Image: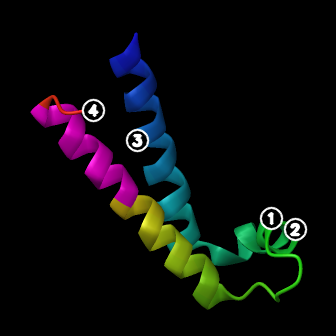
């Protein structure tokens, strides 16, 4: 069950990361709420998307090697 939850988190991170890279205009309203004092920009959304993809890859590597 633990591996299933980790796989779900990996898939979710990849999905949000790819959508943020290819369609940053879809995430603009969400980032305006999350980053309230600062203005949300496409550059910030793309940076967070790349970070989400990187985190997903790190989690996948941990899952494949057996380290948690």
Left or right, residue 18 beside residue 38: left
Left or right, residue 61 beside residue 6: left
> Residue 4 colored magenta?
no
The CA span between labels 1 and 2 is: 5 Å
Q: Residues within 10 Å of mark 2 (few under 14, many from 20)?
A: few
Q: Which mark is residue 51?
A: none
Residue 22 vertical placement versus 12 (above, below): below
Q: Are marks 2 and 4 in contact (CB under 8 Å)?
A: no
Q: Are marks 3 and 1 in contact (CB under 8 Å)?
A: no
Q: Residues within 10 Å of mark 3 (few under 14, many from 20)?
A: many
* First reached walking from the N terminus: tag 4 or tag 1: 1
- Residue denoted by label 3: 10
- Residue denoted by label 4: 68
- Residue denoted by label 1: 30
The CA span between labels 4 and 1 is: 30 Å
- Residue denoted by label 2: 33
Percent of width and height locating residue 29: 84, 70
* First reached walking from the N terminus: tag 2 or tag 3: 3
Q: Which residues are magenta?
A: 55-65
Q: Quadrant of residue 46?
A: bottom right
The CA span between labels 2 and 4 is: 32 Å
């Amino acid at each position: 069950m633990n591996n299933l939850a980790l796989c779900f988190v990996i898939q979710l991170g990849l999905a949000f990361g790819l959508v943020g890279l290819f369609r940053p205009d879809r995430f603009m309203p969400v980032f305006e709420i999350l980053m309230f004092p600062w203005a949300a920009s496409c550059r910030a959304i793309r940076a967070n998307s790349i970070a989400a993809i990187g985190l997903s890859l790190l989690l996948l590597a941990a899952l494949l090697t057996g380290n948690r």
